[in-house]
Amino acid sequence: NVVGTLTLADVCREHGLLMMNYATGCIFEYDAAHPLGSGVGYKEEDKPNFTGSFYSQTKAMVEELLREYDNVCTLRVRMPISSDLSNPRNFITKISKYSKVVDIPNSMTILDELLPISIEMAKRNCRGIWNFTNPGVVSHNEILEMYKNYIDPKFTWCNFTLEEQAKVIVAPRSNNEMDASKLKKEFPELLSIKDSLIKYVFEPNRKSFAGGVSK
């Protein structure tokens, strides 16, 4: 996470290349200045405040070091979601398999919309740090409600608290809202997280349960 990324940045700089670094926004957590539900998100210049996992610590460390490079574009991805609901790395696929989920609003990244934007960012020679999420937040329950409405009407799930979750996971999870206004200014067509979920994920996967065949 640190040495490998820095090595790539060094090699790219030696060859005069822009490096698009798909990084993470899981280096922040809700706090007094960015309370849950407030709509106040973390900006690109904010310093990481989440150290609950070694992963997040290393990602925060390398982000700070990469600020010194003029050939790197760091994209803070969060809880990546794609239209491929068979992919086990897909956030929706993950939480749909859990016996219990927490219900906390978070900023997330719809890959079907944002990956093409990242290609355009490279063409535009964008550099520095970018919050690479759709504007707004969405909770686990809201996503699973959409999953039930669009994909599986018989789907059910249970919630548990952060305290209960802490007993069954190895390391704490980052929960936060990212301020996507910088990205939205560069790409005004960028959809809000809920609109993007519907357009890029759930509408394409909507099932016709009369015959169990995808439309």
Image (cartoon, helix red, strand yellow):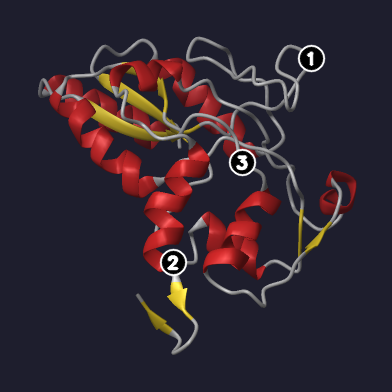
Amino acid on which disc 1 is placed: Ala
- Which residue is drawn at the image coordinates 40% and 32% (left, top)? 3
Q: Nearer the viewer, mark 3 or mark 1?
A: 3
Q: Nearer the viewer, mark 3 or mark 2?
A: 3
Q: Earlier in the sequence, mark 2 or mark 1?
A: 1
* Residue 15 x/y as whole percent: 10, 24
Q: Which residue is mark 1?
A: 32
Among all residues in the image, which is located at the extreme left?
A: 15
* Residue 63 x/y as whole percent: 46, 22
Can you see residue 129? no
Q: Work out which quarter of the rendered image holds the C terminus and state it.
A: bottom left
Amino acid on which disc 3 is placed: Val
Cβ–Cβ under 8 Å for marks 2 and 1: no
* Residue 200 x/y as whole percent: 38, 52
Q: Which residue is mark 2?
A: 87
Is residue 129 or residue 55 the one in the foreground? 129
- Which residue is drawn at the image coordinates 89% and 52% (left, top)? 164
Q: Which element type, helix, strand or loop, lies under badge 2? A: loop
Question: For residue 138, which numbered disc appears in the image?
Answer: 3
Can you see residue 178? yes
- Which residue is drawn at the image coordinates 58% and 18% (left, top)? 42
